[in-house]
Image (tube, rainbow, N blue to C red):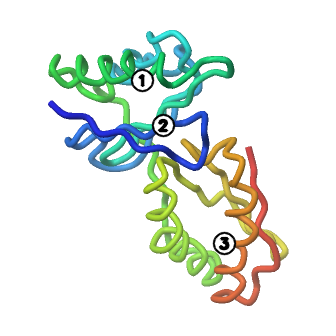
Amino acid sequence: MFIQTEPTPNPATLKFLPGRPVLAKGVAEFVDAEAARVSPLASRIFAVEGVSGVYLGADFVSVTKRDGVEWHELKPAVLGAIMEHYLSGDPVLAEGVEAELEEVGADDPVVARIKELIETRVRPAVARDGGDIVFRGFERGVVYLQMRGACSGCPSSTMTLKAGIENLLRYYVPDVLEVRAVG
């Protein structure tokens, strides 16, 4: 098994590509070992000293390290944990646990258009960097988005929101005045 790695715009997060599906649908984010108990894969990764976050996408795993830990020390152990998981035959998520799905329902036409743009133009771009962006609301011209995975805490995430996503949404949806990040 060969696992590729890619840097992300967030220096604390590295993207791992196992060459196999990770989640068939949806995403899963774990911010500590306790939350990761529902995922054999994330649990193995959190067993590596220095890991502070795990984000699972369709075909990648983004791992965030703690401050003071260097990737050259951490990367081999994370690669080993991912390889061990796939060789074990264990599921990525425990039985009965489902990944989080973003609902793109038939809302208000403005909200539906915002969600469509995020789904088709924004999410694929941030997924390439090992992250995700989730629509959390639209109120009085303000779009609320949550940055996840490599995008969460990334030094360039504010620039991505303001210069990229806000400009895109304002261009296609005149009702959008501003984009704000939520935790």
Q: Which type of secondary structure does the marked residue at label 2 adopt?
A: strand
Give amino acid for label 2: Leu
Earlier residue among tags 3 and 1:
1
Give amino acid for label 3: Gly
Q: Quadrant of residue 77?
A: top left
Q: Which quarter of the rendering shows the C terminus?
A: top right
- Pick the front one: 48 or 21: 48
Name the disc covering residue 164, or none: 3
Q: CA distance from mark 3 to mark 1?
A: 31 Å
Asked if residue 35 is positioned above or below residue 175 in the image, the reply reads above
Picture residue at 41% right of the left edge, 19% below the top: 45
User: What residue sits right under mark 1 in the picture?
Assistant: 75
Asked if residue 65 is positioned above or below residue 26 in the image, the reply reads above
Question: Label 1: how many residues lie within 10 Å, few (<14), some (14-19) or many (20+)?
Answer: some
The answer to the question of whether label 2 and label 1 lie on touching residues, with beta carbons closer than 8 A, is: yes
x%, y% of residue 129? 49, 52
Picture residue at 33% right of the left edge, 24% below the top: 79
